[in-house]
Image: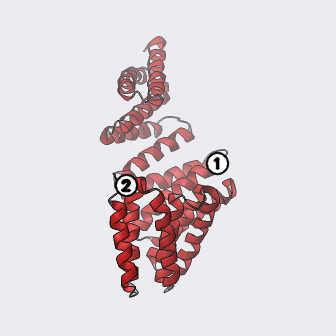
């Protein structure tokens, strides 16, 4: 293939990436598809053009994903990884494509297929020079969620703890990423039947979120709700009721955006009150719920 045609294909590919960054998806798809035709021809004439084809497939897959074409995106990411198995592609680019395919499968509820991709991507990020430990930590958090859902609690805990250790070391304790992992660990321990450890993790998440976001943020409300469930499991219903009430007070301030959470927390709160024989308070809470939900547009 003439060098000029290869260069033209690369220009088209870069144009597609720019269009994607601007949100001009249909134009990006057209440019990426055009670029790919030229790049395939280039590889047939010269195998050294394989890295350009890899990049072209990566861009096309990103565009397809943004357009909601999950099947097309999966095929393009997969073909890019096949090329990476035969040609010298920078390890960080391979790890990125593998990550995007893993998350695509994960969000498509094909978790079992995502697991080996996450595992390999984590290894690839940690093997870079220098290692990209933060990205690996974020992927460990994703992987832990899958293992939790599969009931593999020990594996989930292992990845959460590794993620937490790395993120605290790299970013410091008081970050939203660290708070999120603490929250996820609390959920894992609660599900696994360890409410004491769950309460400890939920408390850590709450303290960090209050410092970062303020006492009236919806994420703080979530942490109060989580603490309420852990305290109830531990038999401390007074603390449980208190945390439910704090959660509801915050959610009422954000009702238009948080109505689903508000309703769910309210129903849990009412159930606890009824369980404790506080029928009058439960009735008032139910009337409050009905009144507030009637205001949601």
Judge from the rendering whether residue 108 lies leftward or rightward of residue 252; answer left or right: left
Between discs 2 and 1, the one toward the N terminus:
2
Residue 125 shows in this picture = yes
At which x and y percent is residue 36? 38, 25
Real-space CA distance between mark 2 and mark 1, rounded to the nearest whole angstrom: 25 Å
> Mark 2 — residue?
113
- Secondary element at image label 2: helix
The 10 Å Cα crowd at callout 1, few under 14, some 14 to 19, many 20 or more, is: some
- Residue placed most toward the observer, 209 or 38: 209
Residue drawn at (35%, 77%), measured in percent from left and top? 283
Asked if 174 appears above or below 197 in the picture, the reply is: above
Residue drawn at (37%, 82%), measured in percent from left and top? 280
- Residue placed most toward the observer, 207 or 28: 207
Q: Residue 24 falls in which quadrant of the image? A: top left
Residue drawn at (55%, 77%), measured in percent from left and top? 197
At which x and y percent is residue 61? 39, 36
Q: How many marks?
A: 2
Q: Residue 205 falls in which quadrant of the image? A: bottom right
Q: Which mark is residue 131?
A: 1
At which x and y percent is residue 56? 44, 29
- Residue placed most toward the observer, 274 or 117: 274
Image quadrant for the N terminus? top left
The 10 Å Cα crowd at callout 2, few under 14, some 14 to 19, many 20 or more, is: few
Q: Which mark is residue 289?
A: none
Residue drawn at (51%, 73%), measured in percent from left and top? 243
């Amino acid at each position: 293939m003439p060098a000029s045609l290869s260069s033209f294909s690369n220009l088209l590919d870069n144009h597609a990436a720019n269009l994607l960054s601007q949100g001009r998806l249909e134009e990006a798809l057209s440019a990426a598809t055009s670029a790919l035709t030229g790049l395939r021809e280039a590889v047939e004439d010269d195998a050294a053009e394989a890295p350009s084809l890899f990049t072209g497939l990566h861009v096309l897959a990103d565009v397809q994903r943004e357009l909601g074409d999950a099947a097309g995106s999966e095929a393009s990411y997969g073909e890019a990884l096949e090329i990476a198995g035969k040609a010298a592609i920078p390890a960080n680019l391979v790890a990125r494509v593998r990550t995007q395919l893993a998350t695509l499968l994960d969000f498509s509820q094909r978790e079992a297929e995502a697991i080996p991709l996450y595992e390999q991507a984590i290894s690839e990020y940690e093997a870079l020079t220098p290692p990209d430990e933060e990205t690996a930590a974020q992927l460990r958090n994703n992987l832990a969620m899958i293992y939790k859902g599969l009931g593999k609690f020990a594996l989930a805990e292992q990845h959460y703890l590794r993620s937490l250790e790395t993120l605290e070391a790299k970013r410091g304790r008081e970050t939203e990423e660290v708070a999120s992992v603490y929250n996820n660990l609390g959920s894992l321990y609660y599900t696994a039947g360890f409410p004491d450890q769950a309460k400890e993790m939920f408390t850590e998440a709450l303290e960090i979120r209050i410092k970062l976001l303020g006492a009236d943020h919806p994420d703080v409300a979530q942490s109060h709700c989580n603490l309420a469930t852990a305290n109830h499991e531990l038999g401390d219903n007074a603390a449980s009721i208190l945390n439910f009430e704090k959660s509801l007070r915050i959610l009422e301030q954000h009702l238009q955006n948080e109505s689903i959470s508000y309703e769910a927390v309210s129903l849990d709160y009412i159930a606890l009150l009824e369980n404790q024989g506080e029928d009058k308070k439960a009735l008032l809470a139910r009337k409050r719920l009905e009144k507030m939900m009637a205001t949601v547009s």
